[in-house]
Amino acid sequence: MSDASVRQRDRGNASDEGPLAGIAVIDLSTTLPGALATQFLADAGADVLCVEPPGGSPLRSRPGWPALGRGKRSVVLDVHAESDRKVIDRLVAGADVVITTMRPAAAAHLGLAPESLAAVNPRLVSVAITGWGSSGPWAHLKGYEGLVMAKLGMFHVKRNIVGRPGPAFVAAPYASWGAAQTAVHGILAALLERESSGRGQHVEADLVRGVSTLDTWNWFTELVGIRWPGSFTVVDAYTDDGQPQSPMALGLLAALTKDGRWLQFAQAGQGLFRALMEELGLGWRYDDPRWKSLPALDTQELRTEHWKTMLDKVGERTYAEWTQVFESNPDVNAEAYRTASEVFDHPQLRHDGRVGVVDDPDLGPVRQLTSLVHSDDRPLTPLRPAPRLDEHGAAARAVTAVPQMPSPSAEPEPVRLPLDGVTVVEFALMYAGPYGATLLTDLGARVIKVESLDGDPIRRAVAFPEAGGAKAMLGKESICLDLRTEEGRRIAHELVRRSDVVLQSFRAGAAERIGVDEPTLRALNPGLVYLTAAGYGTDGPYGHRPAYAASIGAASGFALAEAPYVTEVSGDPEKIRASVPRLYAAAARASLQSDGVSALGVASAMLLGLVARARRRPLGALTTTMLATAAHPLVDWNADYEGRPPLPAVDAGGYGHGALYRLYRAADGWVFLAAPAADEWPPLAEALAAEASLAGDPRFVSAGQRAAHDTELAEVLSRVFSRLPAADWEARLTAADVGCVAVTEQAPETLVQTDPSLAAEYATTVVSPVFDEHLRLAPTVRFSRSATQTLGACLAGDHTETILRELGYDIQAIAALRERGVVG
C-alpha cells in the first residue's frame, strides 16, 4: 500500500455526514450501472441498503466489489417469495429512492413496476436502469454492455485498437458508467424537484443514452457529412494501415521512451505543439518552407516523415528525462500509459487525497479511490467497508412501521422542468466542463456561458465551422467578455450575484488571476454552488498542466483497460510504429474517451451541490478532475487488495471475454454473443441444436467444463456463426431470449441520425444558426412527471446584448463596451 494513501476505518454503515445524509436508498440492482450509481449516493452520505438474492448478488464476484459496495448495507431477500416481498414493501414505504436494473417486464412481474412502487410510497423516486430504454426498436433485447456497444457501433469505432480487420471488443465499461451517472442526474434532479412539490416520480436511464453522451464532436461532423455529402470529409487521426493523416496524430502523439515506457502527449493547441517542437529540437522546421504548415502538413509523405522523426526524437530520452522536462516546462506535457492499478501512484491523485485505504474485516486493507466529488479539498464522507452478506438483514427484516410522511396533494401539478429557475454561469473550456453544464440545460437550467472575445477554442477544433463545439453549446446562452479588464470582471461578477452555480475548468491559478475564484465569488453570493472541474486539480504537481482526453485516458488506465493486448515491442521501430495508432485509438477516439466520462461527473457534482443546498446541508468549494473521474469507472481494475479475483481476460485477437461473451464472424459481417450466465446455456444450446450438438457434448455439460474447454467452444461457435448472416442469428437467438446482435459497422452518430426508428427514440429535432433544423441527442433521462427540454446550440456572443440589457446596460453603454473591447 502506498504511504500516500489515506487509511480510513469503519465508522458504521450509515453516515451522518455528507449532503445526502438521511436519504434512504433501496438498491435492487444486480449489474454494474446500478452499483456505480449507488456508490456515488453512498459516498455522498445516503443510507444505501442492498437487497441481495439468496446466495448474494452477482456483484460480489466482481474484483471491484469492496469499493462498489463501500458504505452500503446488506439484506438477503428473495423477491420471488411472498413473505420477503412484504419486507421489501415495508422498506420501500420508508425509502426515498429505489433502483432496479431489470427489464421492465421482469420488474412488473415481481411487483416492482413504477406504478406499484408509487402506490406503496407516493414520495418515492423510483429508478430503472436498462440496456436500451423501455421503448424503441431495441427495447426487447437483453441489456448486456457488450450487446449495446456492438449494436450501437461502438466496437466499430474502436476497430483500430486491434491488428486485424473488423470490430474490436472494448473491455472498459463506458456504457455502464454513462448509464450510472445519467441515472444519478435523474435521481438528484427528482430529489431536488421533490423539495418543492413533495412528490416522487419514476426516472429512466439506459446504456444507449448514457454511452452516447461520451462523444465530443462526432455527432456534428457526421451530421455535416450526411447533410452536405462531399463538402466535408471526416478524417481519422490514422489511416487503416496506420499512417498519420491528421494534425491530431502529431499533437496527441503516443511514443515510446528510450527505456520502454509509452507516453501520451497532450499538445493539441498550436502553441503547445510548437513548444513540443522546440523541446524536440525541431523548432527550426517552422522557418523551413517545406514544413512551415506544421502540424497541418500537406502531403501524406510529409506527415509520415515528420511523425517518424517525432517518434525517434522522443525515443532518444528515458522516462526519467522526460519527467524532468514536464516538471520544468509547463507547455509540454505527456502522461505515461498506466495500468488501472498504477493510477494510485499518480502524484496528483496522491496530492489531492483521492486515494484511500479501507480496513475490510475479511479482506484486509483495500486501496481504492475516494469520492468522485471533493468538498473543500476533502472527500464527501469517510470511506467505509463493503457489507458482509446479510450483515444488516435482521434490522431490515424487523422494520414493521414506517413514519407517516405528509401525503402529496391530490391536486394535479403543472408539468415543470426539474431545474426550472436554476442559473449556471460557466467559465469553462473545451468539452468535459462545458458538456457537464449542457446536460443541466436539458433538465431546465439556464446556463450562461462566459467566453473570451475569440470564443471557446472547441468551436474551432475541427475544420467545419462550429462542428467541434456544437454539442457542448446546446441549450446555452453565450456572452463574450474580456475578463482581463476590470469592466469585464464587473459584468461577470454581476452575473454571479444572480446565479445559483458557477462552473470553472481553468488550470490551477487561472481563476484567481481573472477574479472568478471561489473566495471572490462566494463573497458576492454566499449561497453559491461553486465547482472547479479542472483536468488535474486546483493546485499540486500537475495542476498547471494542460489536460486532454488522450493523456487522461492514458494516465487513468482507461486506454490499457480497453486494449490490454497491446504487446511489448522490444525497441523494434516497425512494431513501435504499428502500436502507436492502436494506443491512440484506445486513448483518444472521439466517440469514447475521457472527456465524456468526466463531463458526466461534472453534471453529477453540480446537481449534488444544488440538492445539498436545498436540503440545508450546503457544501464547500466542490472539485472534480478529469484524471480522478476517468479512473472511477475502472473500479474492477483498480480496487487493490490481497487475493483479489482476476478480471476476465480479453483474448489477444480482441474478440471478447471467452466463448460466451465475444465477437464472431458471420456469413456476412459479425455478431456479438452474450450468454455468460449458467441459465443461459440451455436456451443457447437448444437454439443452435440444428447446427451443433452442444447440449450432449461432454466438454460443455457444466459451467466448469465450458470454462476448461473455452477455446474449443469458441472454435465450435465460430464454425456455427459463419454459416448464416448476422441478422439471421440475431433474430433466431433473440427469439430464444439469448443475447446476440448483429454488429453495426458504422459510426454510432451516423446510425442514429439515418435510421428513422432510432432517431425517433434517441434523438430530437432542434434548430441551429449553423446547421439549420437538425437532429441532436434526446435528454439522457426520462421522468414520469417532470419535463425535459432540448434546445439548439448558440454561437459565441449570441446573447451578449440580451444579457447586458438584463443587467441594466442600455444600447449606448453596450456600444461603448464593444468599442473598448470589453465585450464581443
Image (tube, rainbow, N blue to C red):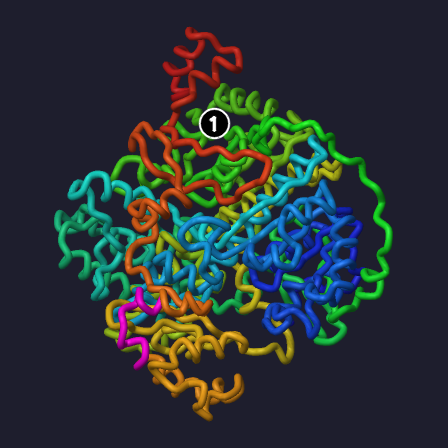
Left or right position of 311 against 816: left
Q: Secondary structure at mark 1?
A: loop
In the displayed structure, 122 sits above or below 598; it is above
Q: Pinpoint residue 116: horizontal percent, then vertical percent.
A: 67, 49
**Residue occupying the point 42% across, 53% down:** 549
Give x and y (percent) for residue 167: 31, 66
Quadrant containing the C terminus is top left
Q: Quadrant of residue 363?
A: bottom right
Q: x, y percentage for residue 156?
A: 32, 61
The quadrant in which residue 524 appears is top right
Q: Residues within 10 Å of mark 1 (few under 14, many from 20)?
A: many
**Magenta stretch contains residue 328:** no
Q: Which residue is mark 1?
A: 483
Relative depth, front residue between 498 and 105: 105
Magenta span main SS: helix
Residue drawn where x is 72% and y is 75% of the image: 364
Task: Specify start and end residues of the magenta stretch as a single range.
Answer: 719-730
Q: Name the amino acid type tagged 1.
A: Leu
Judge whether 256 appears above or below 705 on screen.
Answer: above
Q: Is residue 675 above or below residue 817?
A: below
Q: Does the magenta segment cover residue 723?
A: yes
Q: Is residue 134 visible?
A: yes
* Quarter of the figure with residue 783: top right
Q: Position of residue 47 (x, y in %)?
A: 75, 53
Q: Residue at x 39, y 42 (%)?
A: 763
Q: How many marks?
A: 1
Q: Say left or right for 614 vs 315.
A: right
